[in-house]
Image (cartoon, rainbow, N blue to C red):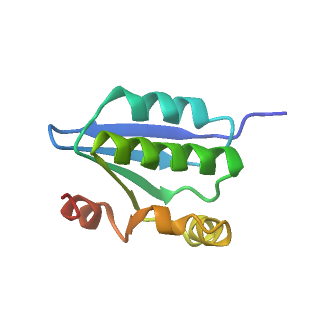
Amino acid sequence: MEKPEFAMTVEASPDCRVMSLWGPFTMYSVFEFQRVVREDNAALTVVDMGAVPFIDSAALGSLIGAVISAQKAGTQLVLASVTERVRSTLQMTQVDRLFEIAATVDEARSKRR
């Protein structure tokens, strides 16, 4: 089975980190995502999902783990630009209430507590 295309970039400043994801977020990309999430304890982490067409259960689990870890660490994780298909997955699984969701990355940055 061929691995689907996935890419991630990270833009970090002292108080905010933006992780931009591209492509299907699946079990093939979970470990890279988790590694990057654990690298830094910025006060605010924004996960830009505007170019993510879908997520699978492994990716959903890693997002849940990331938001719970952020809460325990006293930091904040906000999802931004979530596509309709990903939003539907979050709602169907009833985990959407765990996340702060912003329409844009700029809006997510303004949510910093």
| The one of 17 and 2 positioned closer to us in this rendering | 17
Would residue 25 be seen by someone viewing this image from the given angle?
no
Name the residue rendered at 67%, 44% in the picture: 58
Relative image position of residue 16 (x, y in whole percent): 22, 45
Tell me the quarter of the picture where residue 26 sits: top right
Q: Is residue 51 above or below residue 30?
A: below
| The one of 93 and 83 positioned closer to us in this rendering | 93
Name the residue rendered at 52%, 48% in the picture: 63
Q: Is residue 95 above or below residue 40?
A: below
Q: Residue furthest front?
A: 72
Q: How many marks?
A: 0
Relative image position of residue 87 (x, y in whole percent): 56, 69
Tell me the quarter of the picture where residue 14 sits: top left
Q: Quadrant of the C terminus?
A: bottom left
Q: Is residue 106 above or below residue 69?
A: below
Relative image position of residue 106 (x, y in whole percent): 24, 63
Q: Residue furthest right?
A: 1
Name the residue rendered at 40%, 38% in the picture: 9
Relative image position of residue 2 (x, y in whole percent): 79, 34
**Left or right of 75, for residue 50:** right
Q: Quadrant of the N terminus?
A: top right
**Left or right of 8, for residue 108:** left
Would residue 27 be seen by someone viewing this image from the given angle?
yes
Q: Residue furthest left?
A: 14
**Left or right of 113, for residue 61:** right
